[in-house]
Amino acid sequence: MEEISVAAKTIFNIGGLGITNTTFWSLLISMGILFIFIGVFSRAKIVPGKVQNFLEYILESFLNFADSITMSRTKTLEIFPFAMTLFLLIWSCNLIELVPGLGMFSILRSPSSDLNFTLGLAILSIFYVNALALKRLGVFKYLGKFFNFKSPVLFYVGILEFIGEFARIISLAMRLFGNLFAGEVLLMVVSTGINWSLSYLVPLPFLALETLVGFLQAFIFATLIVVFYSTAVETAHG
């Protein structure tokens, strides 16, 4: 079994730049998702095939769910592409920990079990949410929720709101990282000493649990982005 390490491992270098196992998989998965969607929807049919039908089902289901949060199809469409992309990327990355041989080969590691990856996604997400809300409402209207000088109480609340944006980054990053890293460690420990051919049989209950956890964490992350955007717009508007 490979040594359990919080830090990602460099597996090769390109021009002196070290590429870690989590970076490798995140790039590979991102390109895979892109090629699949371009390949399917560039040749979309009125009567969809199985793959197109499955993808449309996922997109439509999350779109309707996002509508129930924003209560507005217009607002949903503004944040939906980003949130849906996050969901597909994180979900796909989480599935890496289910591949047989986890812990035996240093190249196998879910990007979501790397704090650098989850922190990067969290920073990008909160920045995007604020930028989108800023674009929709305008500079003065949106920043008014952070810097309100009408009363000491409102000013204090605004400062708390500002600090809260940074707290959201930490919360998003640590929740995803903690759950996926713990899951990988659990699967590695359970699979220790087991013949590779049996690595899917013995820890089967844990694999089922991690399959569910991987889906839920991706869904929760994407859902929170929709909630944050809807809240940002409504709070600033109010």
Image: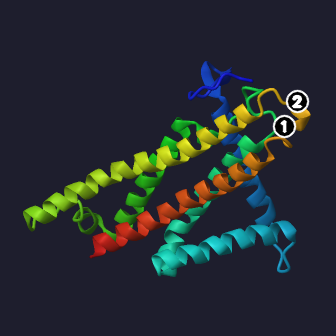
Query: At 86% across and 80% down in the image, what residue appears?
Result: 47
Can residue 30 be spotted in the picture? Answer: no
Q: Is residue 157 left or right of residue 193?
A: left
Residue at the far top in the pictured view: 16
Left or right: residue 87 versus residue 103 is: left
* Picture layout, residue 110 above or below residue 137: above
Please report the residue visible at 71 percent of the width from the left and 38 percent of the height from the top.
Answer: 187
Residue in the picture at 42% in, 70% down: 230
Quarter of the rendering containing residue 237: bottom left
> Where on the picture, by quarter, is residue 194?
top right
Q: Considering the image in quadrants, where does the N terminus appear?
A: top right
Q: Residues within 10 Å of mark 1 (few under 14, many from 20)?
A: many
- Check disc 1 and give the amino acid type: Ser
Q: Position of residue 135 (x, y in %)?
A: 37, 65
Closer to the camera in the image, 113 or 162: 113
Q: Tell how many labels.
A: 2
* Measured Cα–Cα span from mark 1 to mark 2: 6 Å
Q: Nearer the viewer, residue 204 or 48?
A: 204
Q: Position of residue 112 (x, y in %)?
A: 60, 43
Label number found at residue 199: 1
Q: Quadrant of the C terminus?
A: bottom left
Q: Are marks 1 and 2 in contact (CB under 8 Å)?
A: yes
Q: Circle 2 sits on which residue?
A: 195
Residue situated in front as seen by the camera: 30 or 94: 94
Question: What's under tag 2, amino acid-wise?
Answer: Asn
Mark 1: secondary structure: loop
Q: Which quarter of the figure has residue 140?
A: bottom left
Q: Give the residue furthest to the right.
A: 197
State the image coordinates of residue 40 (x, y, percent, origin top left).
80, 64
